[in-house]
Structure formats: structure tokens, C-alpha cells
Image (cartoon, grey):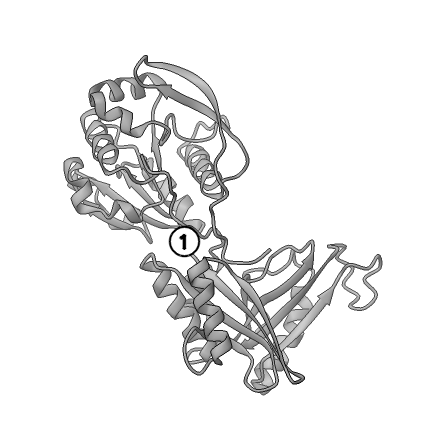
Amino acid sequence: MPTDRLDVRLDTSLEYLLERAPAIAPPRVLATVVATAGSTYRKPGARMFIMADGSYLGLLSGGCLEADLKLHAQEVLVDGVPRAVEYDMRGPDDVLFGIGSGCEGAMRVLLEPAGPGSRAAAALEAAGRAAQAGRAASLVSVHESADGPLGTFEAAAPLAPVLLHAAARSLAERESRGVDVNDAGRRTRAFVQYLAPSPHLLICGAGPDAQPVANAARALGWRVSVVDHRPAYIVAADFPGAKVSLCTPAALRSSVALEHCHAVVVMSHHLPSDTAYLGELARAGVPAYVGLLGPAARRRRLLEELGPAAKLLELRLHGPVGIDIGAVTPEGIALAIIGQIHAWLAGRGDSLRETLDLQGGREQPSLLQPSLFARQGNAG
């Protein structure tokens, strides 16, 4: 049984922008949070696009800063010069900026041109390609510099050596960091963002109730793969944005790179197939989260069918899968499933669930203590 979970990034604002921006006509400005203090709606690494017509994609606040950011973005569109702006909402009356948000936090935001062919667009697209391939990446947002241009860069030339070193260290340590260098009064400040891979969910079974599960995951910017042994169910149009494959349960390990999946949900509604899927997952030892749709009695029967291999699923298996929210519709069940996986990926608090005494067949409540392993791709 694996003891380590895959590194993961739950802030998928990068994917959100890349997937939705192509339908929006340029020009546009990229706004990136590069530093915060106190309580803020978003943290360093959060991004949004501001269009020339004043519309925008994404949010950096609950709506209290966006109107002012639009004014600064218009200036960037006119002169093409990146700039950083600061908001400090920690005063009781918010006198300095007059925004009156009451957020009790401060935020520094980098604004830069980000239309097709821009340096920012190229950097985001490179990070997006790495994310789609399940690889980690880093982005460097220079928001103050006496010697070079401001903006978002890939970790490559023409970045200064000190920033290239910071990017390499960020990747090695899997951690975002702020960089502040003062060389004889010449200051350089940058935010180096570590971007872990976004969540990759595997769904075993492509029945109608798998569609809302895939849709809910895709809405969060997750990567989704769907497999089924029934050709009639393998319809790519039913799972927009997901990778859909015809795969027999016995060929799961040879057909899917399970070691790159963060979680799997077994939901084919076919007892022999679910048994075979669980057997493949048990022997593979990954992923560390295995969700099983269906009641406890069905789970027990499947584990009995597996025999000794069932022991390999101990503490990995979540069945019945999902948080008990009283769901009765396929969409509600999908919400319960994705909600549980999201909480599990985040290592959010203590998780009380039923674990299995696989030898005795009894269910015992056990308080598990998941580790806080998720990398959010930002500091703070």
C-alpha cells in the first residue's frame, strides 16, 4: 500500500484562463496577485484576464477590486507597459483607496499585456502544456526591477541568474516563494510560483451517471479520464474535455498510467467488471484514493470476490464513495463524490469514515489523520 500521495494543485485558475480565453477576442491584460498580507480573497499566484471591453475572466477579490483594476488595465492596454498596483484594505475606513471592502488585507497585483504572441501568453501556455502532461512547472512574475522588464516569464533566458536559481529551487522544493534582491540600491522583486500538476481523476465506467461526475471535475479544472469495456458507452461527446477510452477491466494497468492518477472512482454498475477493476487497482498499489459507488453490502460482496487481494485496498477504499449530503439525483451524487475527493486531496482536517476490517468483514469507525500534502501553487 502506498504511503505517499501525488503532489497536486487545487488552484486551477491557470486552466480556467487557458480553456476560456481562446473564445475571447484580444487584446487583454493579465492580472496576477504577486504578494499579500493579512486576509485576502485570493493568494499569490491567482490570475485573471481583463479585456479591452471591460469584461474579465476570473476574480482576484470578491468583486471589490475589479472595478479599479479595470482602470489600471486600460492604461496598460494603451501604453503597453506592465505595472504593479497595491491595495491596502487593513484600515477601518479604507481611506487610501476608497474601496471600503473591509477585507483587512493588502494585495500587490502585476498587470501586463497578455494578448496572442505576448511574453505572458507564451509563459502561461507553456505552464498549461506541462500541467496537461502531468508535469510540474514554475512561472516567474517580476513585479519590480531596476534592470529589466516587468512581467510573467518561463523559467528560462532572458531571466537573471538569481531568478533562474529561484525557479529551479522552487521546483526542487515544490514550493512557491517571493524573491527580493537589493544590489547596491537596485531592487528586484518577483514571485516564483510552483505549479504542481492539477488533479487527475480516473472514472471506471462510462454510464449516464458518470457524466455528471466528469462534468463536476472538469468544472474545477481537473484532468479526467474515463474508461469502459462497453463500446456503446464510449462516446467522447458525452464527456467534454475528458479523455475517453475503450478498455477491458483486466487491461486497466496496461492501458492507463495509474501512477499519474490522483484518484479513481469505480462505477460501472457491472459486478464482474467492478471486481476486475478493483483487482487491478489493488495490485497496482495506486492511486491512493479509490472510490466505489454502491451500498456497503455490494462493497462487501466485491471484496469477498477479490479474496486476499482485498487487503491491498485497505485504507485506500472509500465505499460508498462520497460525502453524505442526502443526494438523490445524479448531479447531487456527483457533487458528493467530487466534494469528498476534493477534501481528501486537500488533506482537509480529520476525516471520519468507515474503514474495513477486511478479515472479519466488520466496519469500524476510524478517525484518519490525512497529511497536508496538497500544493496549491501559491504562497500563503
Q: Is residue 34 left or right of residue 245?
A: right
Mark 1 nearby-residue class (10 Å; few <14, some 14–19, many ≥20):
many
Q: In terms of image quadrants, where is residue 253? A: top left
Residue at label 1? 198
Q: Is residue 34 above or below residue 313?
A: below
Nearer to us in this view, 323 or 330: 323
The quarter of the rendered structure image containing the N terminus is: top left
Residue visible at 67% across and 75% down in the picture: 71
The quarter of the rendered structure image containing the C terminus is: bottom right
- The x and y percentages for residue 247 are 17, 42
Can you name the residue that lies furthest to the front here?
184
- The x and y percentages for residue 82 are 58, 80
- The x and y percentages for residue 364 are 43, 17
Q: Say which amino acid is labelled 1.
A: Ser
Q: Is residue 135 above or below residue 183?
A: above
Q: Is residue 187 above or below residue 321?
A: below
Nearer to us in this view, 151 or 25: 151
Residue visible at 58% across and 61% down in the picture: 44
- The x and y percentages for residue 106 are 71, 62
Under circle 1, the secondary element is loop
